[in-house]
Image (tube, coloured by chain):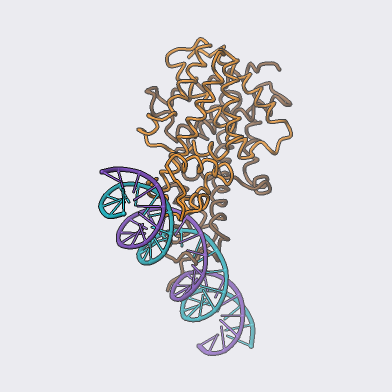
Chain colours: A brown, B orange, C cyan, D purple
Amino acid sequence: MARAGLTAERLTQAAADLADEIGFQNVTVSALARSFGVKPAALYSHIKDAQDVRVRVALLALAELADRAATALAGRAGKDALVAFANTYRNYAKEHPGRYAATQIELDPETAATSAAGRHAEMTRAILRGYELAGPDQTDAVRMLGGMFHGYVSLEMAGAFRHTPREVDASWSRTLDALDAVLRNWPPA
Amino acid sequence: MARAGLTAERLTQAAADLADEIGFQNVTVSALARSFGVKPAALYSHIKDAQDVRVRVALLALAELADRAATALAGRAGKDALVAFANTYRNYAKEHPGRYAATQIELDPETAATSAAGRHAEMTRAILRGYELAGPDQTDAVRMLGGMFHGYVSLEMAGAFRHTPREVDASWSRTLDALDAVLRNWPPA
DNA sequence: GTATTTGCTTAATGCTATTAGGAAGACTAG
DNA sequence: CTAGTCTTCCTAATAGCATTAAGCAAATAC
């Protein structure tokens, strides 16, 4: 019997690819083992349990997404940065629906803090540097932007916008215009 | 052996309550059967399969939410309506996390069209009547609002805002101010 | 009060997750 | 290059969930 050469990293990568193909929810220990041509029990030398696999995929996706966003943000400011960041986010979700779904699982606080999740909020703050928002206003805007991007993309991927004829891309573009407008003219408390 | 008096309606109701208690993901046919003191097989006279239960809970939650929102919207317009609708949405998610999670499953197009899902978009349009938005702009704004509410609430419930000291309620309030502002002053294409 | 329908049970199959213990490939030392 | 050890993978076993088929018993119909 030749060995399959399993490692936690290769398993995570394969699980992420599998998630994009068959859906994050369908990434089971068994399915993952099948994709390597080994028995399910073989995985337990490398991963703790099924939840461990899910968390690893989530962290992988968060890191990938943060990397892409960082690249997209380089050398941009203001609305340019806003649009670049938002499109990176949306395009990643479309290219990698399984990975994107993985980012939505709940991470325990320590894991979340250590992970790339923090980089996202940090980058959102970086975008806001191009607008004149500080202090609590900035926190509020970070939360609003995070919610907006996540919510729009989630609903779009869930098919919530499919029943209205207008192009989803156009609505997205106008939504970004609106966000830019409100950030430039943030209402006073 | 006394009978448990199962019906599709009672099962759906119980499944919804169970979802709020133990999480939507943990609502299994077995767990639901246990909550009635019957064997899992007994449920199959009333429901088609596990997915059927999930869909029924989703439709129940969507209908409940639409009812609440309709009540909240009655007699309100403009920002009042916007805030009332948004708070209804957010409070429902907090009170009924399991039901709320259920609303996020993908419904096949026919089911979605027949269900209360359509009422939500309709009500969002009603809110926008208090603002001067028409045609494609209105569709864009409906999508933006839907994404915003869903995304903010999702992230909040997932704990994404827990690592920043500022009150989440305050950010929510300011986000609604911002949405009101941008709707009143929708940027031209 | 008997007949029929309906609701729930038991029984069985197949899937998944997980643990324990064994066998065999792959390093390591002499 | 052989012997020992470590690691990787396998087999075997347990347990839970989903689902179907077949049977018994309770409620209903006449």
Q: Is residue A153 above or below residue A175?
A: below
Report whether A58 appears left or right of B12: right
Percent of width and height locating residue D24: 37, 61
Percent of width and height locating residue B73: 54, 18
Q: Is residue A64 visible?
A: no
Report whether A184 appears left or right of C11: right
Q: Is residue B101 visible?
A: yes
Looking at the image, the residue that sits furthest to the top is B132
| Closest to the observer, A134 or A151 | A151
Report how many numbered discs are placed on residues in the image.
0
Name the image quarter holding residue D4. Answer: bottom right
Percent of width and height locating residue B4: 47, 49
Report whether B144 appears left or right of A108: left
Q: Is residue B169 above or below residue A42?
A: above
| Closest to the observer, B28 or B178 | B28
Report whether D3 appears left or right of A33: right
Residue at x 70%, y 26% (from the top left corner) = B170
Residue at x 63%, y 38% (from the top left corner) = B160
Q: Is residue A110 above or below residue B129?
A: below
Percent of width and height locating residue B59: 45, 34
| Closest to the observer, D29 or A14 | D29
